């Protein structure tokens, strides 16, 4: 019982680690990889897995005090996983299509994929993986 409470507030909860098959791509290519999900100390219900492709622009904007901003380009929600048992490990393949006009990596541009587990009544663990666009 106590394990379930701690898992719900993020201690000993489910973990996610995204592994991308390679890290360099060209615009229009497909990013493929595997999500490794590891159960925590208690069973937890999952409402889905959200994969989001972002581009970080490192530039000064007049409407912000920050020197960078993240632009969301693509979002995929996978419903393949609905429950993860305590200490259980699962591997789930994924793919995200890059647009033909995806900005290339440079001094002021960086791309990354954020993976977030949508845990019901719990903390949503996340992972961030940088990709290079040439």
Image (cartoon, rainbow, N blue to C red):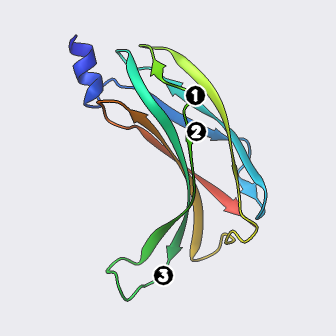
Crowding at mark 2 (Cα within 10 Å: few <14, some 14-19, many 20+): many
Label disc, if present, on residue 43 of the rendered structure: none
Q: Which residue is mark 2?
A: 18
Q: Quadrant of residue 28?
A: bottom right
Side (left or right) of 129 relative to 8: right
Q: Which residue is mark 1?
A: 80
Q: Which residue is mark 3?
A: 59
Number of numbered markers: 3
Q: Nearer the viewer, mark 3 or mark 1?
A: 1
Residue 64 versus residue 132 in the image, above or below? below
The image position of residue 89, as x and y in percent, is 54, 18
Disc 1, SS: loop
Crowding at mark 1 (Cα within 10 Å: few <14, some 14-19, many 20+): few
* Residue at 66%, 69% in the rendered image: 105
Work out whether residue 36 or residue 84 is closer to the camera in this orientation and state it.
84
Disc 2, SS: strand
């Amino acid at each position: 019982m106590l394990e379930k409470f701690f898992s719900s507030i993020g201690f000993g909860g489910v973990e996610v680690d995204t592994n991308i098959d390679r890290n360099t791509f060209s615009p229009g290519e497909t990013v493929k990889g595997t999500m490794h999900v590891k159960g925590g100390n208690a069973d937890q219900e999952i409402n889905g897995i959200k994969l989001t492709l972002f581009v970080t622009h490192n530039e000064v904007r007049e409407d912000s005090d920050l020197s960078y901003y993240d632009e969301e380009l693509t979002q995929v929600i996978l419903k393949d996983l609905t429950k993860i048992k305590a200490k259980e490990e699962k591997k789930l393949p994924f793919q995200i299509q890059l647009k033909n006009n995806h900005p290339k990596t440079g001094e002021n541009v960086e791309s990354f994929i954020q993976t977030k587990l949508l845990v019901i009544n719990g903390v949503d663990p996340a992972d961030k993986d940088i990709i290079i666009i040439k």
